[in-house]
Every structure is written in structure tokens, then in C-alpha cells.
Image (tube, rainbow, N blue to C red):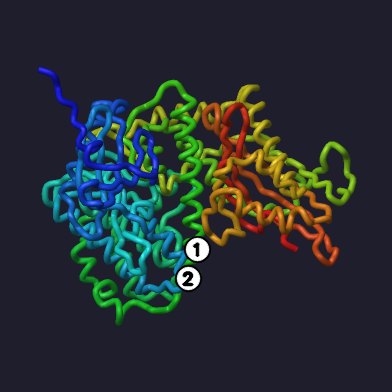
Amino acid sequence: MATTTCTRFTDEYQLYEELGKGAFSVVRRCVKLCTGQEYAAKIINTKKLSARDHQKLEREARICRLLKHPNIVRLHDSISEEGFHYLLFDLVTGGELFEDIVAREYYSEADASHCIQQILEAVLHCHQMGVVHRDLKPENLLLASKCKNAAVKLADFGLAIEVQGEQQAWFGFAGTPGYLSPEVLRKEAYGKPVDIWACGVILYILLVGYPPFWDEDQHKLYQQIKAGAYDFPSPEWDTVTPEAKNLINQMLTINPAKRITAQEALKHPWVCQRSTVASMMHRQETVECLKKFNARRKLKGAILTTMLVSRNFSVGRQTTAPATVSAVAAAAAAGTAAGLVEQAKSLLNKKADVKPQSNSTKNSIVTSPKGNVPSPALEAQTTVIHNPVDGIKESSDSSNTTIEDEDVKGKSIDSSSLKAVSERRQSSPGPAVFSRKQEIIKITEQLIEAVNNGDFEAYAKICDPGLTSFEPEALGNLVEGMDFHRFYFENLLSKNSKPIHTTILNPHVHLIGEDAACIAYIRLTQYVDGQGRPRSSQSEETRVWHRRDSKWQNVHFHCSGAPAAPLQ
């Protein structure tokens, strides 16, 4: 007897535009034909999944079916067809909570209280249903719509587990480093309290715009977390009420048995009596810090997504895993080689923590091979000054990268493979690697010269049409496409008749597979202002390059510090 292939999704739903992409899944808007109701369809390519990945997919679907709460992205249907599995979720259109906050004209402690209340309501429902999320972080906090006061929605249950009552057990090393609890880092039995610890980290960020635990070195970060080594520094915490700090302290209690529960936290005066307890003062500094925090997260996402694309299309062997809605989570869930992830994170930290260089022999300005000749008008020059060794420092912050043990139960992390990757990374690069790194530096130099010359045509040839960028001119927003940049070329750069000299200090290049690379550097720009006075500006920049049809194109740009182009 012939087997009938299920076509229920194909028969009942109409697919529309793509909303997001993971390693082996894509999320698209769809409409149920008989009702006109819109959903977000997560479409998983099951042909690429291993047996273990199938189990994880089934676990995620089973858990999502349990959860029905206004502050949780709800699963409405789960359909298997030949080669594909479809998960039908709420269509959530409001974007990330943290991105919405920085766009608000007014943001106070009371607003933070309302946000954490909704998050705690979602967590309480999970815990009442015997579910531990294990990956609470800003990327998984969404808004139902663009409307004012839209509900916060908890998303992405790819790492969630089921527990019996207050069961504590070792369920594997899983989560996102900056949000991991001390008991997970100590590889002890854990349970629901891990979610409350993560809520404490999120609340801390909601109030001041930066995390309580931070270090470029992941080992040091973990030591901070295990010791509960955070504080409330002046001046930003001076304006936060004692009640808010008290709630954070109860959430970030090292002993999970003494940590506040979701139900208790919802009864805390700062949450349930916010109108009289929480401050109503606008927190502009928090918004500014949160913009930088968001930009850092997005930059990491862009680089890890580039890594993922490069790995899936340029490397012969692929490690299969179910993808998640989040591109960053997908990079981890895709089984991306630990060393590759660590290297990209290392580069990110190098870029993010670049400090202005003092005048020293090591970083003194060196002229180009043409000699020390003043730049004539309209002839921009770019100088590259290298570090003695273009290496990647062993640095492994991963504040928004989800990680999970290969097995959910029982195993401790095998650090030997990570160590081996680290040792290989620190060995001297071969001639081919050196040559490609020089190629990336050269193409970056050409791009900057096009900017300095006001040559939009040359600039557009080097950039991907969908170039994404974070830069001071964009005021904390992610800009996509070339129109934003065209405006500056047409109205400023092309009309500039004064000499410009750019020095690229200490470029660090990291190759990601055969067809992708990142470069981080300090850009020192010398120019003449409107009054004829010589000026200098400095910015820290990172560019992500991707090679298509043998041609390198800039796909992402991140700049912090002074505007990349002098505006005087």
C-alpha cells in the first residue's frame, strides 16, 4: 500500500516574505487560507538534521505547545511534510524590546519595572508548566507590535528543558555566557533559579544600559559570575531607587536555594507598586548606554551570521542542527566549530575595546612609500600602520552567543578540543593566509580612499548593495542599503576641495573560511576645517567582507568614536 505524503501546510497556508534565517531553517510570514490569520512559519529543512537534532526539534515543539500566555510567543501548529517541518508561531512585528527602548522619547525606572514584570510573568508561567527557558537574554525579548505599550513576548525555546517540580539536576552546559548562573558555571545541579539569575542580569541592563558582569576574557567573566562580583557604581546608580537595587540583589543571589522566585519577584514592591515606589525620572544616560550595548550585540550578530553563511556555502563538511529564529542563536545551534566562534568573538572584543592611542614610537604616523609630502587638494592618502604581529589575542567574550553541550545530560565540557584550536590559532600563519590578510587590508584602504575622494561610484563597487552599518551619523540605528551613504557623498564629500589624509592604525584581520573576513582598526583622519585650520578625528571601525564571484564586497560596517567623514 502506497504511503500518502502529508501536504497539510501546502494546502492550508500561503507563504509570503522572509522574516529571518537560521542555519537550516527560514522564517516566513504566512497566511492561513481559510481564516486570513497571519503567522510566522519557521520552516526547518529536516533532510539536513541528525537523529539528535530531530529529538531537539521535537523537544522544542513539545515545550512550545505547553505554553499559552500573553507574554510568550505562542506555537499554534506543528506540521511535518516530506523534507520539511513547519512550526506556526504568533506573528510578532514589534522587534526587540531593547531596540524599542532606545527609540523612546521618555524612559524611566517605572518603564523598566513594567518590562521586567512582563518578563517575570512569562517566566512564572514557564515554571508553573515545568519548563526552564535557559536562554533568557535581550535577543529573545520581543514586542507584539509597533503600537505603544505593546506586550513583551518571550521567544526562542530552543534550549528549554522540562523539569519535575523543583527538580535540580545537571541538564548540560547551556545558555549565553553573560547570562549564565553560578551553578551552571560550577557544573552543579540546577533548575528554575537559572532563569531568575538571567532576569537579574536583564534588569541591571534595563536600568543602566550595560551588564553587571563583563570581561573581554571569558574565564575572567565566569570568575566574576561565580563570585557574584558586581556593584552599583556612581554616578549612574546614584539615581536608581534602593528598592530596584534590592530586587537585583535578590535575583543575583549566588545560592540558588536563597534566590528569589518568579512569584516572589512579582510581589516585590518595586514591581507591584511601581507607581509609588519606582522613580519616574527620565534616564537619558541609560538610553545612550543601551544604544552602544545594542550596537555591540548587532555587530556580533552580523559577524557570526557572515561566519555561518561562509561555513555553509564555502566549506564542504557541514555540521547539522536545527536552526532557531535568531541568526546569532542559529550560528551556535548550527554546530559552528568552537574555535571559529571563539576567533570571531576575539576579534569583536579587540574592536570593541580599542582605546585611543597616545603618541608613541610604536603608533607614530608613518608616511606612505611616496615620502613625506603634503597631500595636494583632492588627492586623499591612506597610510596603514601594522602591529608587529597581526595576531588574534586569546579573548573570548561571547555575551550574546548561545552555547549548548553536545549532550543535554551528564557530560562536562571537554576543553581539550578548545585548547587545541586555541594553540593552532596562535601558531604563525602561512604565506597564503598572510597574503589574503594583506588583500583585505588593501581593499579596505581602497574603500577609505573612495570615501575621502568623494567617489561614490568607486565606493558602491566595493560595497554590497545591502550593506548594513552602525555609525555615529545614524544615531544608534542600523542602516541598510546605499541611500544613506549616497547623501553624504553627494552633499559633502564630493564638494570637499581640502586635503584629507587617513591613517589606518593596527589593522587586525580575521579570515572566516575562504570567502569571508573581518578587519578591525583605528582610523585617524587629518583634514582642514572650514576656517582653514588643520584638524584630526579618530574612530574605531570594523568591516565585514564577503567574497562573491572572486570579488570582495563590504557587507557590514561598524564605527564608533568621531564620524567617519569630517563634517566641517
Q: Which residue is mark 2?
A: 236
Q: Residue at x 50, y 38 (%)?
A: 344
Q: Residue at x 66, y 43 (%)?
A: 460
Q: Where is residue 310 shown, x and y percent of the image?
A: 49, 31
Quadrant placement of the N terminus? top left
Q: Nearer the viewer, mark 2 or mark 1?
A: 1
Of 490 and 346, the residue lying toward us:
490
In the image: residue 552, left or right of residue 69: right
Q: Secondary structure at mark 1?
A: helix
Q: How many marks?
A: 2
Residue furthest to the left in view is 1
Of 38 and 559, the residue lying toward us:
38
Q: Is residue 367 above or below residue 484?
A: above
Which is more N-terminal, label 1 or label 2? Answer: 2
Q: Is residue 106 above or below residue 158?
A: below
Q: Secondary structure at mark 2?
A: helix
In the image: residue 533, left or right of residue 511: right
Q: Where is residue 98 shown, x and y percent of the image?
A: 41, 60
Q: Residue at x 54, y 53 (%)?
A: 479
Residue furthest to the front in view is 34
* Residue 252 visible to an observer of this rendering: no
Q: Is residue 3 above or below residue 345?
A: above
Q: Which residue is mark 1?
A: 289
Real-space CA distance between mark 2 and mark 1, rounded to the nearest whole angstrom: 10 Å
Q: Is the C-beta separation of discs 2 and 1 under 8 Å?
A: yes
Q: Where is residue 41 shown, x and y percent of the image?
A: 29, 43
Q: Amino acid at mark 2?
A: Glu
